[in-house]
Image (cartoon, rainbow, N blue to C red):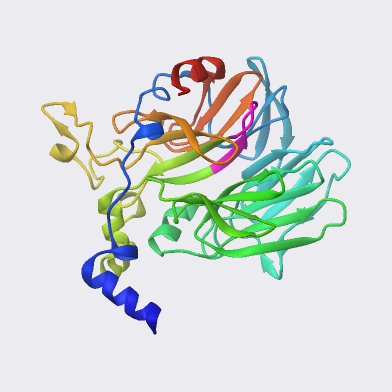
Amino acid sequence: MIAALRTWTDQLLGRGAAAITVPIFDGALKPNQILEQAETFAELEEPEDLATDGRSLFVADGACVLRYDGGAATIVAQADRRITGLAILPRGGLAVALDGTELRVIGGPHDGRNWTGVAGKPLNAANAICATADGRLLVTDGSQTQPCHRWCHDLMSLGRSGRLLELDLTDGSAREIGGLAHAFGTAAAGKDVWVCESWAHRVVAYGEGKWGLPIISRLPCYPSRLAPAANGGYWLTAFTCRTQLVEFVLRQKAYRTRMMKEIDPRYWIAPALTSGNTFLEPLQGAHLKMRGIHKPWAPPRSYGLVMRLSRDGSIQYSLHSRVDGKNHGVVGAVECQGTLFVLAKGRRRILKLPVAELERSLQP
């Protein structure tokens, strides 16, 4: 009764969960053009995820896994479906998510082990994998109602059916933590497990005495994958940013329902991995440009963002591709031999940046 009354008053007064305010980019999130100015390492057909063993860069591109040693690419695995998640196992081999519906181990001592469901529910949108040193796989299953490529449908449906899965490579046992607002990205943080909740704009921790404890909250973006940094801490990516217009649409059920039913998803008032490619997009003209100059305060339909986190989850600095840039839709970042590789899925390219230079110029 009290919760229902609070919801009603929030909707009446436009506060709490009904507010459409969005946190600003400031402090460690102050915008720059570092991702936009970064060197392009590779351009691919269907890049989905990155991983590293500390020596080489591995890329999930369509149905194959590529390994980069220096500049040349070698195909090290070929699957029968699109790969939506990738991890390197400590004792050798790869763990891949196939079209979000199957998790399979390729090579190494656990070659051939696979999962198609956990806790009596089929895998539906497996999108990120983390392999731990003690023989577990941490997997995020983004949604139980929408496949990976329909993530925007999950957002517009206010989806909260994401799961964090913990799989044991030795005996094949598994357990889940459900009810997440689009789980996308996970990492082992000591004895805890961190997981990104994209639609809740936060990273939360699960472990002893911690059950959904927010590590970072009220982000002005939709977080995606996590990866460890060489000197401790993590790299956190965000595939696009929040806007007041989208926050308003999310609170208008009748409008959302008609929009999803009557309009092509490419032209919804919704976040995107890339933008500025057609005159049919919802935000155009003087909303974005005036006299040929892109407004720095224009609402971003797509954006590129990587955040450097400390061990406790504090944001130390960030790398941006702003509204007028092209390296948007960042869904992965891994550090390998002093270089940060960033996957800008919206542009279907991998960027490379020297970590030492970033630390010197951006570290407070």
Identify which residue, 163 or 101, lies in the foreground. Answer: 163
Q: Residue at x 83, y 57 (%)?
A: 172
In this orientation, does residue 262 appear? Answer: no
The residue that appears at 45% across and 24% down in the rendered structure is 364
From the viewer's side, name the closer residue of 68 and 335: 335
Q: Is residue 156 above or below residue 337?
A: below
230 within the magenta span: yes
Question: Which residue appears farthest toward the left when viewing the image?
Answer: 291
Task: Specify whether residue 346 is painted magenta.
Answer: no
Q: Percent x, y for residue 175? A: 73, 63
Q: Is residue 105 above or below residue 305?
A: below
On the image, which quarter does residue 86 sit in? top right
Residue 81 lies left or right of residue 76; in this view the side is: left
Q: Quadrant of residue 93?
A: top right
* Residue 335 visible in this rendered orientation of the protein: yes
Task: Give the residue drawn at x 19%, y 32%.
Answer: 295
- Residue 294's spot in the image, x, y percent? 20, 29
Residue 290, percent from left and from top: 12, 31
Picture layout, residue 285 above or below residue 201: above
Magenta stretch? Answer: 225-233
Q: Is residue 184 above or below residue 359?
A: below
Q: Is residue 312 left or right of residue 241?
A: right
Q: Is residue 348 left or right of residue 27?
A: right
Quadrant of res 338 = top right
Q: Nearer the viewer, residue 135 or 327?
A: 135
In percent of the image, x 56 and y 25: which residue is there? 341
